[in-house]
Image (cartoon, helix red, strand yellow):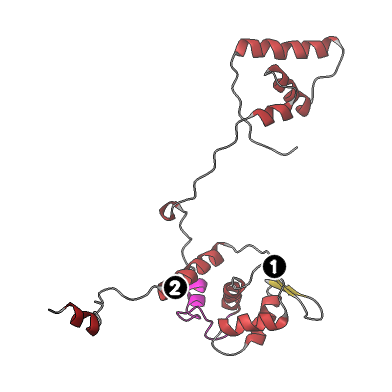
Amino acid sequence: MSRIPLSFVVPDASLFARALGTCLKTRHDAGTPPPGHVELLNLVARALGHRNLQALQAARPPALPEAPLAPEDRPAAPPLTANARKTLLQFDSRGRLLRWPNKFSVQKLAMWVLWTQFDGRRTYTEPQVNQILKAANAFGDHVTLRRELINHRLMTRKSDCSEYRKLPVRPDDETRALLAAWRAMRRQRSVPRTAGLTRRAPDSAMTAAAP
């Protein structure tokens, strides 16, 4: 039986105890064995005035929706490991992989970044995968990247290479920290640098405003 949190209020403890005691005494007088876990839950529900546990669960008020966490209340990403820092340096400010890393552990982390470029809800053809990977690297070897995504079990494909899918794998703390840093780098790159600039009014507008 699944564990579902359920709280309830006993309006009258004495009445509740008598009702539960009566149910247990009736079972005892009839020679029925002690109630099991589910039976006891149903007896508690009846002592509270409900038909059974399901009726008690249905009568509880709906839970209030949880407010989304503000950015400052979200848990901080774990610090970058040495390998994660090395991996981050393999990407340019636009998020493209600059080179194929020599170290295997760095290769594996770099593949996680490329894994984020795919949608787990859709199926890709090989040309579509190639297009995404070509845009995601700056050294012109999308074939190696495609193969390594398969080797690292981040994507899967049919034997005839007609379909590719992103696998629903879960990154560890080291990888999550890297992905957070990579996204932050992308966001910084996308912020327009307009601070301190004064926009000059067109000459025609200045002429029209002159007396």
Asked if residue 92 lies in the magenta stretch, the reply is: yes
Q: Which residue is depicted at the point 64% across and 69% down? A: 119
Viewer-nearest residue: 205 or 142: 205
Residue with the mark numbered 2: 185
Q: Which residue is mark 1?
A: 167
Query: What percent of the width, then of the height, locates residue 194?
Result: 31, 75
Question: Considering the image in quadrants, where does the C terminus appear?
Answer: bottom left
Identify the residue at horizontal 51%, vertical 69% (top origin).
Answer: 178
Q: Which residue is farthest right?
A: 31
Residue 59: x and y, percent?
Answer: 66, 28
Tell whether 135 sits left or right of 188.
right
The answer to whether residue 101 is seen in the rendering is no
Q: Earlier in the sequence, mark 1 or mark 2?
A: 1
Reply above or below: 128 against 180: below
Q: Residue at x 63, y 72 (%)?
A: 118
- 89 over 183 or under it: above or below: below
Disc 1 to disc 2: CB gap under 8 Å: no
Residue 65, quarter of picture: top right
Q: Horizontal and vertical percent for residue 60?
A: 63, 30
Where are the magenta residues, as a range?
Answer: 83-103
Principal secondary structure, stretch drawn in magenta? loop
Q: Amino acid at mark 1?
A: Leu
Amino acid type at circle 2 is Met
Asked whether residue 84 is drawn in magenta, I would say: yes
8 w.r.t. 146: above or below? above
Task: Classify mark 1: helix, strand or loop.
Answer: loop
Graded by Cα atoms within 10 Å as few (under 14), some (14 to 19) or many (20 or more), the crowding at tag 1 reads some
Q: Residue at x 24, y 83 (%)?
A: 204
